[in-house]
Amino acid sequence: MKKVPVFLIVFFAMTNISGASAATITVGANIEGADYTCIQDAIKNATAGDTVLVFPGNYTENVYVDKELTISSLSGNPVDTVVKAANSKDDVFTIVSDNVTIRGFSITGAGIDQYGDDKAGIYIEGANNGIITENNVYSNGYGIFLHDSYNNTLTDNSAYMSSIGGIFLWNSSYNRLYNNYINTTNQEGIYLYELSNNNELNNNTVNFTYSGIGIDLSLSDNNTLTSNTVLNSESGVLLTGSNLNSLISNVANSNNWNGIDFQESNSNSLCNNTANFNKNNGIFLMKSNNNRLDYNNASNNSYHGINLENSSTGNILTGNTADSNGKKNIHVADPENNMINAVLPQESDPAQELLFQNFIPSLIAIIIAVLIISWKTRKH
């Protein structure tokens, strides 16, 4: 049997020094001196605030976390600490307590239950203020699923080969998703569904969502998406019935349909996004009103660069770049009720925004010239 390195136990114990009663409980199969051989036994015997420290190995179990705990792999390397579902019809980790941290595991093996519902690698139900970090979550129905859960932080996780989606939020608000990598899912990469409001999505990457959306917001408001990248998905970023969201400096390139797509979504802001080389439109608005599109780049798309269709009104486009698209660079179905560079356009032709930008200094020059001529005439 392997022995527990004493200095590592001391290190993790010291990290809990701020909580006088917190303990470090060890888990290891065939590890001499480990407290338990499975994670669930350690949780059962832990007290809220404890740390459960898991040694490298393969653990076949479904883990149910119902108290405030930090559950961490010893190595911090998910490759050598693997938790596989003992029952594929259940979630691998189920979290129902606030203030839970899960760090440094490979998590796999959740499939479909007896009712036909897909299960998750990590399922968080009604739990707040948790931290899910540095995990590899793969070959599950969903990678990470939050339901009715608030103020959680998901950072530096990989979710891949999911039969449904990578990260799914349902009625879950004020969560932070940073630096996550989602690859090879059958449907959505990141999905904010039904009253998932005020979330922050920063610097996430979604690649190869075969028949779904890279980042999908449905009936979800006031979210901020910054510096995310979506590539090789059916569509890049889709908003449906979602309002007052901000999309800043995101990249939605090389997708099979639209790069950024608004459906019946109002009062959103798009600033400095890139939507290039998509097989339909770069940026597309359908029945979407009062949105701001500022300084975006929508070029080299197969159809239009920026396309405002069917009853989309009150939208304002300023300083956007659209070049080398298959049809029009900027197409507005209702030009009388949308504004490009704060003037009502007669027609949105490829160079319209650039022409307006050049018009102002020319107009000023003409006015100055007229004033000079008038002054000289009066002098003589």
Image: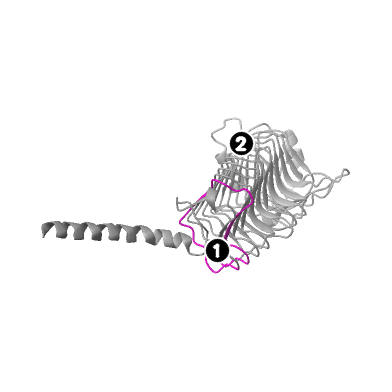
> Which portion, as a residue range, is magenta?
300-326
Q: Look at the image and tell me in which quarter the C terminus lies.
A: bottom left
Residue under label 1, please give it. Answer: 329
Q: Residues within 10 Å of mark 1 (few under 14, many from 20)?
A: many
* Residue 323 appears in the picture as rendered: yes
Residue 379 position, x and y percent, is: 11, 58
Would you say residue 33 is visible in this rendering?
no
**163, above or below 50, in the image:** below
Question: Toward which corner of the image does residue 63 lie, by quadrant?
Answer: top right
Q: Is residue 115 left or right of residue 305?
A: right
Q: Is residue 350 above or below residue 181?
A: below
Q: CA distance from mark 1 to mark 2?
A: 45 Å
Q: Which residue is mark 2?
A: 129
Residue 326 appears at what percent x and percent y? 60, 68
Question: Callout 2 environment at 10 Å: few (<14), some (14 to 19), or many (20+)?
Answer: some
199 or 307: nearer the viewer: 307
Q: Which element type, helix, strand or loop, lies under badge 2?
A: loop
Q: Residue at (68%, 54%) from the top-left corner?
A: 213
Is residue 275 in the magenta section?
no
Side of 69 relative to 41 (left or right): left
Indicate the amino acid at tag 1. Asn
Chief secondary structure of the magenta portion: loop
Nearer to us of marks 1 and 2 is 1
Q: Is residue 355 above or below residue 56?
A: below
- The residue at the far top in this view is 21
User: Number of callouts in the render?
Assistant: 2
Q: Looking at numbered disc 2 in the image, what kind of residue is underneath it?
A: Asn
Q: Residue at x 46, y 59 (%)?
A: 353
